[in-house]
Image (cartoon, helix red, strand yellow):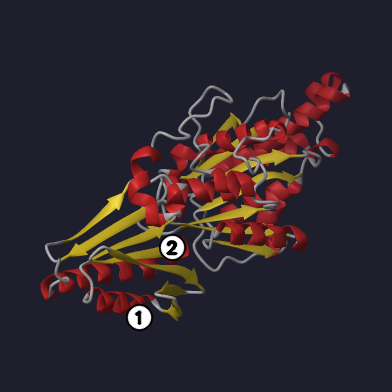
Amino acid sequence: MSTINKQNINKLKLFLMGLENRFSENSSIFKQVNTTYISGLKEFKGTGLYNNGDIKYNFNGKTETLNISQLFSNIIKEAESYDSLSLIYSERGSVILISADNKNVTMKNLDVDPIDAEDSNNVSSKSASASTRGTTSTLLNRDYYIKIGSADNLLKEIGIMSKDGKIKNDKIRKYNQIDRYVELLEGILDKLPKNEIVNILDCGCGKSYLSFVLNYYLTEVKRKKCHFIGLDYSESVIESCRIMAKNLNYRNMEFQAIDIKDYEPSKNIHVVLSLHACDTATDMALALGIRVNSDVIVAVPCCHKEFLSQYSYEPFKNILKQGVFKTRMADILTDGMRCLMLEAKGYEVSVVEYISPLETPKNTMIRAIRTSTENDKAMDEYISLMSSLNVYPALYSFLNDWEV
């Protein structure tokens, strides 16, 4: 064979210019570059890994830290001395193969299971078998959104899967919960902007399991650009989240140890999440979502204590004297008024059971999609209910405090 001719070297340059632009837009999900040069019967391999905005590239026993432009310039210069070049550019959820020789230069996207993208040197030989592995778990006899096989790294990091690749017996319920969460958000997330980065704010994030799961699903399955911000007042919890993000190489995440009410976003927020934030912390998250005009607000409330000590309703006096009934009614009134306030602020609201009530009674998911301007009629109803029930909801208070 003869070395790659000048015409094809120029074509290779054009392809790499496109990848350079892609890197500038998608650097937060870039994984690695692998090169294989061939001269006669010999192969010479190089590997480039992300390193604080640059690429740490090893080739022929030499390691250099280069920016993406320098890396591709070096690769082009090196290609002039070889018979052919195969370059594999890997992102989370996407792999691109460029092949160049004296006859042609081609570029194609490889439909590869994310588990195989970890070893990009062998990606072409694996791609055919990848689609047949781990497609369906029979834990609930359903086709899971977060699939065993492709999501193994994620499931191991969040403690649901053992090192040998099996869902832990005591984590089956948790696995089903996170998959159900993704299922309930699937249609809503599809309505979010397609040509911009979707910013998702997790209020009272805790260990952020669901944010990690959504990050995986949006980035590697739906191939949607996204950025996650986790808020929690606990420094130790935030630090553990940062460690997990680093272990997973999820660079499109940030975590802040801060009270929700003190958070000031530096970018447009598209989605606000709140999972089992205790009592009025849910109201704080809802109020923040309303204040920042979030396109979507999703909350699974917990620990309804506020209304229990406040509300009274004379027509139901003889019913509510039973403590169990009064507690259950307090839960319904709390979430019902939360939904009414969201409607008053221009959101279309739906309420669904998140998981079976046999697993936990705190299983109500509130989903709100911003569709219009404020609804004065709904606000009038809200104010009227405050008077009738003798309550002053935290959500109403938080919103008023922010407006002052």
User: Which mark identifies residue 383?
Assistant: none
135 left or right, relative to 263: left
Please report the residue visible at 69 percent of the width from the left and 51 percent of the height from the top.
Answer: 207
Query: Which percent across, then down, holds residue 167?
Result: 63, 35
- Amino acid under label 1? Gln
Q: CA distance from mark 1 to mark 2?
A: 17 Å
Question: Disc 2 marks which amino acid?
Answer: Phe
Q: Quadrant of residue 364?
A: top right
* Observer able to see residue 344: no
In the displayed structure, does residue 180 sit left or right of residue 217? right
State the residue in front, 362 or 61: 61
Q: Which residue is mark 1?
A: 70
Q: Nearer the viewer, residue 35 or 161?
A: 35
Q: How many marks?
A: 2
> On screen, 222 above or below 142?
below
The local secondary structure at tag 1 comes to helix
Q: Quadrant of the C terminus?
A: bottom right
Element at label 2: strand
Label placed on residue 30:
2
Instruction: Give left or right: position of 95 versus 13.
Output: right
Expressed as whole percent of the image width and height from the top left, the position of residue 399 reads 65, 55
- Residue drawn 69% across and 48% down? 283
